[in-house]
Image (cartoon, helix red, strand yellow):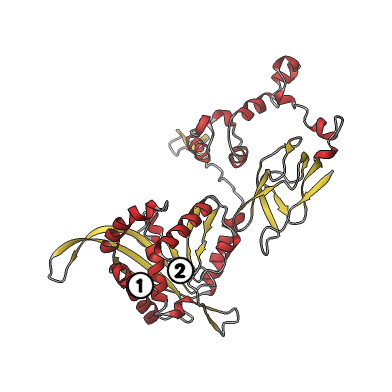
C-alpha cells in the first residue's frame, strides 16, 4: 500500500483545491493515467498516476483543500493486488448499483436511498452537484440543457430564478391581509484559486500604485484592411489572425521610443529596472478566472510568430491549463475588453508592471478627412493606466502617439523590422 503525496506544482504554492476526481476508490489505474484535477492560485493542474495499481482511498474530497507534501490518495501497487486484497473488497458494487429485487422493501421506500439512485443517473459536474446541494435542490428537478441532458451551472441558476419566494400574510392599515415575499438567501461560494489571487493582487495594485489614466481614439480602418489581406496567408499556415498580434508588434516598436514604459520599480522604490525584452501580457477571461499569460520577446518575433503564441496561450488559458512560465516575466499588458463589447474601461495595472492598456470595441463612426469631407472610419477607443510614481502624463502621451501611429499606418512598421 502506498500514499501518493501532493507534489510541488508551482513556485510558492502550498495548497490547492481538489476540483474533480477522475477515479473512485476501487478503480484500477494505469501509469500516467489522469487521476485528479486541482486548482492552484494560478491555473488548473492535472495530476497523473506514477504507476499502475488500484486506488484504495481518496484522502481529500472534491471541493476541499489539499496541502503540498500531504497524502492525496492511497493505492495498492499492481503487483501486490491479489484475489483477496482490500482492493477487491473496495470494488464490490454499492447499494445504488444493485438490482431492485435485491433490496429490502424498507430500502426501496427509504427517502435516503431512492433519491440517490436517480441523482447518480443525472449527468453533472462535481461543481454543479455542489451548487445543487448548497441550495437543497434535487438534480432530478432541474432540466439539463447540456449534451445527453447534462445539467449545467446555468440550468441551476435558471431553476433558482424560477423558484417562487415564500409569501407571508401581513396586515395592512386597512385591516386587509397583504402578501409579502420573504427575501431569498444569497448563494455563498468560497473565493479560491485564481479568483482569490486576483482579488488580493488587484487590491494591492490599486492601493499601492498611483494610477494615471490616459484615453485616446485610434483609427484602425487601414489596419482592418491589412488584416483582411493577410488572413488567407496566415490561415494557410493553420493559424488565426486577430488584431492582437498587430497591437503587440506595434507596442514593442513604440517601447523602443519610450523604454521607461517597459521598466519596473523595485520593491524598495529606489531603482528602475529596464528590461531588454518586451514580454507583452494579454488578459484572458478563462473558466478559472482572469489569467494574464504573456508573449515573450515580441520585438524579435514576426506577426505570424506572435499569432501562433497568441493562439496557443488563449487556448490554454481558457482551459485553465497555462504553464507557470507563461504567466511569469510580463513587462506590459493589454486587456482587450472590446472583444466582449465594452467601449471604455479604466484598467488596473498588473503589478509589478508599469503600464496596461484597455482596448475598447471598434465602431464605424463619421470622421472628417483633411479636406473637411465626412468619411466612414473604424474607430477604436483605448485607455492607458500608468504607474504615476515614475511615468508622467507627457511620457504616456508620447508613447501612445507612437503606438497609435504604427496602428493607423501599419505599413510604417516595415521600416523598423530587423
Q: Earlier in the sequence, mark 2 or mark 1?
A: 2
Q: Which mark is residue 403?
A: 1
Label 2 to label 1: alpha-carbon separation = 14 Å
Q: Foreground residue, 195 or 361? A: 361
Q: Residue 125's image quarter?
A: top right
Is residue 232 visible from the viewing direction of this image?
A: yes
31 relative to 81 in the view: left or right: left
Q: Foreground residue, 162 or 17? A: 17
As drawn, 391 above or below 382: below
Name the residue: 58% across, 57% down.
Answer: 194
Q: Position of residue 68 (x, y in %)?
A: 74, 56
Q: Secondary structure at mark 2?
A: helix
Name the residue: 59% across, 63% down.
Answer: 325
As drawn, 140 above or below 346: above
As drawn, 208 above or below 306: below
Q: Position of residue 40 (x, y in %)?
A: 64, 55
Query: Circle 1: is it few (<14), some (14-19), or many (20+) Cα within 10 Å?
Result: many
**Residue that badge 2 annotates:** 298
Q: How many tags in the picture? A: 2
Q: For the residues labelled 2 and 1, say whether their Cβ atoms are less than 8 Å apart.
A: no
Name the residue: 77% across, 49% down.
Answer: 4
Is residue 164 visible from the viewing direction of this image?
A: no
Name the residue: 57% across, 82% down.
Answer: 269
Amino acid at each position: 500500500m502506498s500514499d501518493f503525496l501532493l507534489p510541488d506544482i508551482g513556485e510558492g504554492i502550498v495548497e490547492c483545491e481538489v476540483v474533480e476526481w477522475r477515479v473512485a476508490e476501487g478503480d484500477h489505474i494505469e501509469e500516467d493515467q489522469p487521476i485528479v484535477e486541482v486548482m492552484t492560485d494560478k491555473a488548473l493542474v492535472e495530476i497523473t498516476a506514477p504507476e499502475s495499481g488500484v486506488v484504495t482511498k481518496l484522502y481529500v474530497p472534491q471541493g476541499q483543500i489539499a496541502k503540498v507534501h500531504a497524502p492525496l490518495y492511497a493505492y495498492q501497487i499492481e503487483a501486490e493486488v491479489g484475489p483477496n486484497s482490500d482492493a477487491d473488497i473496495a470494488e464490490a458494487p454499492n447499494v445504488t448499483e444493485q438490482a431492485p429485487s435485491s433490496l429490502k422493501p424498507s430500502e426501496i421506500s427509504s427517502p435516503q436511498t431512492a433519491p440517490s439512485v436517480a441523482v447518480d443517473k443525472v449527468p453533472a459536474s462535481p461543481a454543479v452537484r455542489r451548487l445543487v446541494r448548497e441550495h437543497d435542490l434535487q438534480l432530478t428537478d432541474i432540466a439539463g440543457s447540456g449534451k445527453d441532458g447534462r445539467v449545467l451551472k446555468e440550468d441551476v441558476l435558471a431553476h433558482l430564478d424560477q423558484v417562487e419566494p415564500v409569501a407571508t400574510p401581513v396586515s395592512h392599515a386597512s385591516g386587509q391581509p397583504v402578501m409579502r415575499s420573504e427575501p431569498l438567501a444569497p448563494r455563498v461560494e468560497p473565493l479560491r484559486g485564481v479568483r482569490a489571487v486576483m482579488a488580493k493582487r488587484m487590491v494591492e495594485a490599486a492601493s499601492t500604485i498611483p494610477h494615471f489614466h490616459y484615453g485616446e481614439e485610434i483609427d484602425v480602418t487601414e489596419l482592418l484592411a491589412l488584416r483582411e489581406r493577410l488572413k488567407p496567408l496566415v490561415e494557410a499556415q493553420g493559424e488565426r489572425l486577430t488584431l492582437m498580434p498587430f497591437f503587440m508588434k506595434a507596442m514593442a516598436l513604440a517601447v523602443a521610443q519610450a523604454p521607461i514604459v517597459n521598466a519596473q520599480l523595485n520593491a524598495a522604490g529606489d531603482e528602475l529596472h529596464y528590461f531588454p525584452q518586451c514580454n507583452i501580457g494579454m488578459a484572458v477571461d478563462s473558466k478559472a478566472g482572469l489569467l494574464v499569460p504573456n508573449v515573450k520577446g515580441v520585438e524579435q518575433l514576426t506577426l505570424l510568430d506572435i499569432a501562433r503564441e497568441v493562439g496557443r496561450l488563449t487556448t490554454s488559458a481558457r482551459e485553465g491549463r497555462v504553464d507557470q512560465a507563461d504567466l511569469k516575466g510580463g513587462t506590459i499588458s493589454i486587456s482587450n475588453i472590446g472583444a466582449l463589447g465594452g467601449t471604455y474601461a479604466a484598467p488596473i495595472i498588473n503589478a509589478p508592471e508599469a503600464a496596461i492598456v484597455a482596448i475598447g470595441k471598434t465602431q464605424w463612426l463619421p470622421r472628417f478627412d483633411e479636406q473637411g469631407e465626412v468619411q466612414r472610419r473604424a474607430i477604436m477607443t483605448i485607455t492607458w493606466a500608468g504607474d504615476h510614481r515614475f511615468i508622467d502624463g507627457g511620457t504616456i502621451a508620447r508613447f501612445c502617439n507612437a503606438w497609435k501611429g504604427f496602428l493607423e499606418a501599419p505599413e510604417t512598421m516595415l521600416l523598423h523590422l530587423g
